[in-house]
Image (cartoon, rainbow, N blue to C red):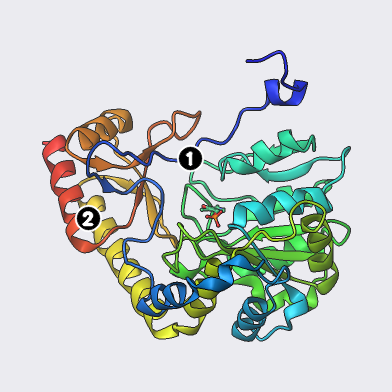
Amino acid sequence: MSKYWKEIVKNIEPYIPGEQPGDKRYIKLNTNENPYPPSPGVIEAIRQGTNENLRLYPDPNCEELRETIAGYFGLSKEEVFVGNGSDEILAFSFLAFFNHGRPVLFPDITYSFYKVYAELFQVDYKLIPIDEEFIIPVEEFYAENNGIIIPNPNAPTGRFLPVDAFIEILKHNADSVVIIDEAYIDFGGESAAVIIKEYPNLLIIQTFSKSRSLAGLRVGFCVGHKDLIEGIRRVKNSFNSYTLDRLAVAGAIEAIRDENYFQETRSKIINTRERVSARLIEMGFNVIPSKANFIFISHPEVYAANLFHGLKNRGVLVRYFKKPRIDNFLRVTIGIDEEMDCFLDIIAESLF
Ligand SMILES: *Cc1c(COP(=O)(O)O)cnc(C)c1O
């Protein structure tokens, strides 16, 4: 605490990311990173980009990257915005679309950054309680509001809502911007990007951090009606002209182009997820059905906190949230098969 801090800085509770330990080599199943390396083409593009042109500013509008993403979704580049990670796009969206006064709605159990942004930007928010099975009650999002954010699949539960549910939410909210945070959509869900043209109030945010193995590069993007995109661009250009550097742009373009590698790695993760989930269910775990690259699990007889510490002592990091309703759950990122076997072995020993 410092007397020089503004009131808002004294009062905010910043987001706490999962540990990135420097002390020893853990099997890291705690921050939903992709266990597979980025496509070799991505590394090569970044290498190629490491040249004397780094003295020049990058393209402030990232035209080529936006065109590449637009092509992938069958959209125009005016319907695409790119940012320094999707967290940045979320922040810009709060500034662009959410007023003071009526609340922004999001689930009570969800990505905790939404609350942090609401507090930082002084936007009222209302938490919509999800049920005991962590299913999002769609009708509760028909309440009066000033904007809606829902991750799909939800984090940290992994639960997926079909596009039809969002169509209902969009129809009941023609006057608000509805944001779907699709950080994990590539692990088995169906993107609502297909309905962008029908709903001018729909914004879909995705990231290269998870399904494209590029958490370290910091690239996210969103797709939506060109007027929404223009709104976000106005905020960005009032904040920082160059949020993406030349190397990030070069790597991201290649990540989209290498479709085969993307398909191969995401299917491997989906297969591993299904195999590990089945094994945990055999061991008596409640495994919430997941369409993400993580699973959310709880055991009726062993406390999650104890499992968390037991795993950590044996070199496996998972995520434990000491928060109401979910403090007996662990969120476990899907790693490669060998890592998951090691995780399962330790779990089996802790139970018996
Ligand atoms: C990981 C994650 C993000 C942020 O990803 P970036 O690395 O900033 O692109 C956004 N939303 C959810 C729900 C996430 O889990």
Judged from the image, the quadrant occupied by ligand 1 is bottom right
First of labels 1, 2 by sequence position:
1
Q: Nearer the viewer, residue 336 or 214?
A: 214
> Is 207 placed above or below 45 here?
above
> Is 327 placed above or below 289 here?
above
CB atoms of marks 1 and 2 within 8 Å: no
Q: Which tag is nearer the camera, tag 1 or tag 2?
A: 1
Question: Where's the C terminus, which quadrant?
Answer: top left
> Is 185 placed above or below 289 here?
below
Residue located 40% across and 80% down the image: 41
Three-letter code for the amino acid on which mark 2 is drawn: Met
**Residue 340 tag number:** 2
Residue 249 visible within the image? no
Q: Secondary structure at mark 1?
A: loop
Judged left or right of residue 323, residue 147 is right
Residue located 72% across and 33% down the image: 119
Judged left or right of residue 76, residue 238 is right
